Image: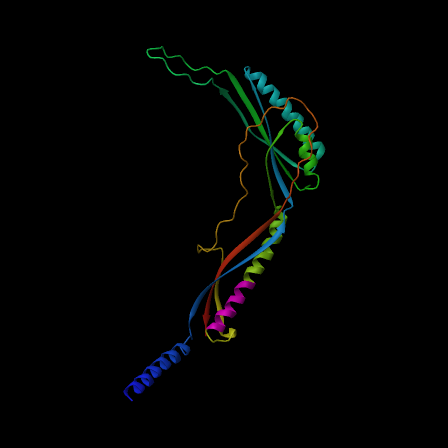
């Protein structure tokens, strides 16, 4: 009999705790709810970096060949893709020294003298003509070398996708508010959206990934202008995401 009474008492206590948990008041409760949204679109822009480099004992001779070949490369690029945006950059000249030899004891110190000079320059090509890009690059590679290529979205596409991204993220927030209200046993109409932070003052959003900078690669001098087979490119897609935080107060 004593055991039965103990079991009944324990069941009563557990039932009371369970009932209390189910009926916890939520009036005036403020809930902070994060939400994410993302949109994906095919890339519509390419940024290619081409280069030329020459090495010669005569610094002027090396620079002259670089200048001539870069001019030829620019003419090819303009002819192949008249709408492309071209920007030359990264002109460099530096000495090439002989390999260091072990210093002999008591040997007089001699200043190091360069054995040659290395001169080079880069050109950035920005284009939306992705269909003609392989032909353009192959033509330019008769003179220049392809250093790097990155695909992305034009500013117009980014603006268009940003509208879609905001809408998708706000929709996700409303869906989560409905889920939280249901879990609290409240109708969603009792939820009042007090604050929405779109990548604002809070540390809610990760920084956008920027396109990787072109790697500095040594461009070997071209010895002739033989035909170059067209390279293969796959522009791929870009996904933009957004995080927001909503502060919801229940009536």
Residue 175, image x and y in percent? 54, 67
Q: From the viewer's perspective, is 168 left or right of 226?
A: left
Q: Is residue 47 above or below residue 165?
A: above
Instruction: Please identify the residue farthest to the bottom as the structure is shown.
Output: 1
Please name whichever residue, 103 or 172, is drawn nearer the observer in this view of the structure. 103
Instruction: Please identify the residue farthest to the left as the structure is shown.
Output: 2
Q: Is residue 63 above or below residue 160?
A: above
Q: Quadrant of residue 129?
A: top right
**Residue under the point 63% across and 28% down:** 144
Magenta stretch: dominant secondary structure: helix
**Residue under the point 49% across and 74% down:** 190
Looking at the rendered image, the quarter that the N terminus falls into is bottom left
Residue 2, image x and y in percent? 27, 87
Please name whichever residue, 167 or 42, is drawn nearer the observer in this view of the structure. 42
Please name whichever residue, 219 or 128, is drawn nearer the observer in this view of the structure. 219
Residue 214, image x and y in percent? 55, 36
Q: From the viewer's perspective, is 243 left or right of 130?
A: left
**Residue under the point 50% across and 15% down:** 115
Q: How many marks?
A: 0
Q: Is residue 113 above or below residue 8?
A: above
Residue 210, image x and y in percent? 53, 44
Q: Quadrant of residue 132?
A: top right
**Residue under the point 39% across and 78% down:** 18
Q: Is residue 179 magenta?
A: yes
Looking at the rendered image, the quarter that the C terminus falls into is bottom left
Colour scheme shown: rainbow
Q: Is residue 158 magenta?
A: no
Q: Is residue 97 above or below residue 2?
A: above
Report the magenta residues as a range: 171-183
């Amino acid at each position: 009999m004593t055991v039965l009474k103990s079991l009944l008492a324990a069941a009563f206590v557990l039932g009371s705790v369970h009932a209390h948990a189910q009926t916890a008041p939520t009036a005036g409760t403020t809930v902070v709810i994060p939400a994410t949204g993302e949109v994906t679109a095919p890339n519509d822009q390419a940024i290619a970096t081409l280069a030329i480099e020459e090495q010669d004992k005569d610094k002027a001779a090396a620079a002259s060949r670089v200048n001539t070949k870069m001019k030829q490369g620019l003419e090819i690029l303009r002819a192949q893709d008249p709408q492309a945006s071209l920007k030359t950059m990264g002109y460099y000249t530096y000495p090439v020294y002989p390999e260091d030899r072990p210093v002999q004891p008591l040997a007089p110190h001699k200043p190091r003298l360069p054995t040659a000079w290395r001169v080079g320059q880069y050109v950035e090509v920005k284009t939306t003509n992705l269909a003609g890009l392989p032909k353009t690059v192959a033509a330019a590679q008769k003179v220049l070398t392809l250093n790097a290529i990155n695909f992305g979205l034009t500013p117009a596409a980014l603006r268009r996708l940003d509208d879609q991204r905001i809408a998708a993220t706000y929709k996700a927030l409303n869906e989560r508010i409905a889920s939280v209200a249901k879990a609290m046993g409240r109708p969603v109409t009792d939820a009042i959206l007090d604050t929405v932070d779109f990548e604002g003052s809070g540390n809610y959003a990760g920084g956008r990934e920027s396109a990787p900078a072109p790697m500095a690669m040594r461009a070997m001098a071209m010895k002739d202008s033989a035909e170059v087979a067209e390279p293969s490119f796959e522009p791929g897609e870009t996904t933009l995401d957004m995080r927001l935080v909503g502060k919801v107060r229940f009536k």
